[in-house]
Image: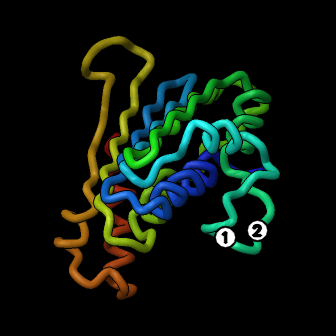
Amino acid sequence: MHYTLCDMIADLTQNAAEAGAAHISVSVDETDTSLTVHIRDNGKGMSAETLKRVTNPFYTDGIKHPKRKVGLGIPFLIQTVAEAGGEWDISSSEGKGTTVYAKFDLTNIDTPPVGRLPALFRQILLLPGTFEMTITRTKRGSGIAEADVRDYTITRSELFDALGDISTAASLALLGEYLEGLEAEA
């Protein structure tokens, strides 16, 4: 099981990166009572048969991790939302990509803690590969007024252009500070 929802989101996003996607979109929408996540990619996608099988923890295609006999990302998602009164969906089309949706009830005692979103965003932005990634973060207050909605969008290529070499400690620290600042304003 994942310790936080951020751990689960990172695992599912890594699957998108490993699927050969050219673009990955991650949206995180939070209210006082729920956290809704969409992870979309335009990677290799899955056949209808494979899509049915990914819910089985003892299924893996054997390609991505040849020695692994289990695939737990989607089964953990299903278990978590079932135990905590959430909802989920996964859709995929071969050659077109995959979309994973999950909504977590933050008021349910069985829902894992959210975790630190800036740390999650830094982790997934730094996944290996040449894909583009767009992260959209929305936080909605308890009121219904437009002023109670705060959001920001991050684009991987723009960040990398601004930071230059992302392998230095200084650029990684700057990225962390930038993400923490965005979250503090949300």
Quarter of the picture holding the C terminus: top left
Residue ID at (52%, 38%): 100
x, y (%) of residue 80? 73, 36
| Foreground pick, 25 / 166 | 25
> Position of 161 compared to 184: left or right?
left
**What label sits on residue 19 in the rendered view?**
none
Q: Is mark 1 on a helix, strand or loop?
A: loop
Q: Which amino acid does label 2 sit on?
A: Arg
x, y (%) of residue 149? 31, 26
Q: Is there CB contact under 8 Å for labels 1 and 2? A: yes
x, y (%) of residue 176? 39, 67
Residue 183 in the image: above or below residue 103: below
Q: Name the residue under label 1.
A: 65
> Position of 121 compared to 146: left or right?
right
Question: Within 10 angstroms of label 2, few (less than 14), some, or many (20 or more) residues?
Answer: few
Tell me where residue 22 sits by quadrant: bottom left
| Foreground pick, 144 / 154 | 154
Question: Within 10 angstroms of label 1, few (less than 14), some, or many (20 or more) residues?
Answer: few
Residue ID at (67%, 59%): 61
Residue that sits furthest to the top in the current view: 144
Residue ID at (76%, 52%): 59
Q: How far apart are marks 1 and 2 (CA)?
A: 5 Å
Q: Mark 2 points at which residue?
A: 68
Q: What residue type is labelled 1?
A: His
Q: Is mark 2 on a helix, strand or loop?
A: loop
Residue 72 in the image: above or below residue 29: below
> Position of 89 compared to 81: left or right?
left
